[in-house]
């Protein structure tokens, strides 16, 4: 097998991708049309991880099940089957707090667009749940519907990002 080369100036050589399904409700505050109404989606997240240093002893970026358990587990606990609402959307927050519910609302500091949900996963959730696992999640693809998706990416060689993932 050819040796690994320093790929700091290139897109990651090896990427492990895990697909995660969940259901959520939201509304986009101040949206120009129908997305201003409370509604729901069957969202799909694709978490793309790359090794900080090298593949593990078995030749993996990370075991697929770790991405499922850590990233999928966080989504399941916090976002699946609940309303994700903007902190400034007080009327909707108050309204939803009146409704019977199994779990708490998830209040975001930004409007809960697909872009902002992907950004939150990339910059807040993944560094927290994958700290010390030897990988960086450098890209989140977020399907709001089968036809519409967004991506958020970062440079996995950025020292500030690596520091977030280090113990
Ligand atoms: Zn929507």
Image: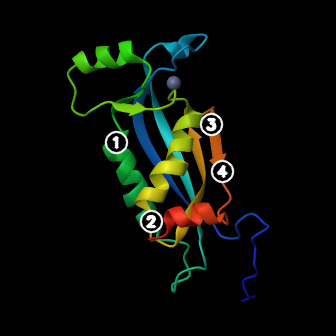
* Secondary element at image label 4: strand
Please say whether residue 145 is visible from this viewpoint: no
**Distance from the alpha carbon under mark 4 to that under mark 1:** 22 Å
Residue 123 image point, x, y percent: 54, 50
Report the residue marked by disc 3: 149
Q: Which mark is residue 145?
A: none
Residue drawn at x 37%, y 12% as measured from the top left: 91
**Distance from the alpha carbon under mark 3 to that under mark 4:** 14 Å
* Between discs 2 and 3, the one toward the N terminus: 2
Q: Is there CB contact under 8 Å for labels 3 and 4?
A: no
Displayed quadrant of residue 119: top right
In the image as oriented, which residue stretches furthest toward the right? 9
* Between discs 2 and 4, the one toward the N terminus: 2
Report the residue marked by disc 2: 131
**Which circle, 2 or 4, is nearer the viewer?**
2
**Which circle, 3 or 4, is nearer the viewer?**
4
Report the residue marked by disc 1: 78
**Classed neighbour count for the residue bearing mark 4: other residues with Cα under 10 Å, few (<14), some (14–19), many (≥20):** some
* Between discs 1 and 2, the one toward the N terminus: 1
Quadrant where the N terminus is found in the figure: bottom right
Report the residue marked by disc 4: 153
* Between discs 4 and 1, the one toward the N terminus: 1
88 versus 53 height, above or below: above
Quadrant where the C terminus is found in the figure: bottom left
**Classed neighbour count for the residue bearing mark 3: other residues with Cα under 10 Å, few (<14), some (14–19), many (≥20):** some
Please say whether residue 115 is visible from this viewpoint: yes
**Which circle, 1 or 3, is nearer the viewer?**
1
């Amino acid at each position: 097998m050819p040796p690994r080369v320093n790929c700091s100036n290139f897109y990651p050589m090896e990427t492990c991708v895990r697909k995660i399904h969940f259901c959520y409700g939201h509304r986009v505050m101040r949206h120009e049309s129908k997305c201003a109404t409370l509604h729901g989606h069957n969202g799909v997240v694709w978490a793309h991880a790359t090794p900080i240093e090298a593949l593990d002893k078995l030749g993996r970026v990370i075991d697929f099940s770790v991405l499922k358990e850590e990233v999928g587990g966080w989504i399941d606990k916090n976002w699946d089957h609940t309303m994700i609402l903007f902190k400034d959307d007080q009327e909707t927050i108050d309204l939803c707090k009146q409704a019977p519910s199994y779990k708490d609302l998830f209040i975001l500091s930004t409007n809960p667009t697909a872009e902002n949900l992907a950004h939150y996963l990339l910059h807040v959730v993944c560094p927290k749940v994958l700290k010390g696992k030897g990988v960086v999640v450098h890209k989140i693809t977020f399907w709001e519907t089968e036809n519409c998706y967004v991506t958020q990416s970062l440079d996995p060689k950025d020292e500030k990002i690596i520091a977030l993932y280090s113990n």
